[in-house]
Amino acid sequence: MAAVVSLLLARGLKQPQFYWAPISTIVILLSPIDPMSLGWQRFVGTALGAVLGAVIASYFEPNWVVYGIGIVVCGILWRDIAASSCIPLCRDYANHYLADSS
């Protein structure tokens, strides 16, 4: 039901790639993680990525090096934000998968 509602909402808002709405809904709802927490984290991540992308696009010429550096910066920011305990689920993930090997 949620996937259908998200599809109708995306089509109603005339989104060009409306098919991603039900896919994202299904992925979030089938996750073993609390859907509200996971949805909020996806929203925050998308917003931060959009802001970083806008800043990069405003100050640099588009090429693969800038794109690669942007991805690395996003990864570093994600690791630091997740480790700062403001997002507990991400903090646990970062501590488990991104812990320093030293």
Image (cartoon, rainbow, N blue to C red):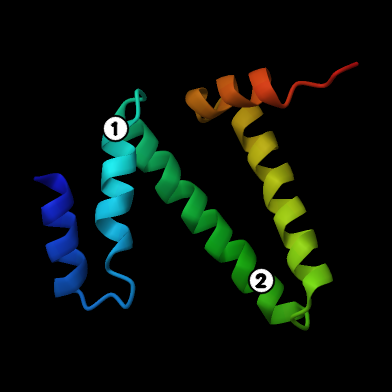
Where the N terminus falls, by quadrant?
top left
Ranked by sequence position, the earlier of labels 1 and 2 is 1
In the displayed structure, does residue 93 sit left or right of residue 15? Answer: right
Where the C terminus falls, by quadrant?
top right
Q: Which numbered tag is attached to residue 55? A: 2
Note whether 30 is above or below 43 in the view shown: above
Q: Give me the residue at 34% from left, 30% from top.
A: 31
Q: Give me the residue at 24% from left, 54% from top.
A: 22
In the displayed structure, does residue 82 sit left or right of residue 63? Answer: left
Outermost residue, right side: 102
Percent position of residue 17, x then y: 33, 72
Percent position of residue 66, x then y: 79, 70
Q: Which residue is mark 1?
A: 30
In the displayed structure, does residue 70 sit left or right of residue 65? Answer: left
SS class of the residue under badge 2?
helix
Other-residue count near label 2 (Cα within 10 Å), few / some / many at <14 / 14–19 / ≥20? few
Percent position of residue 72, x then y: 76, 52
Outermost residue, left side: 1
Q: Give me the residue at 41% from left, 49% from top.
A: 43
Q: Nearer the viewer, mark 1 or mark 2?
A: 1
Note whether 66 is above or below 76 in the view shown: below
In the displayed structure, does residue 102 sit left or right of residue 46? Answer: right
SS class of the residue under badge 1?
helix
The amino acid type found where label 2 is placed reads Val
Quadrant in which residue 53 is drawn: bottom right
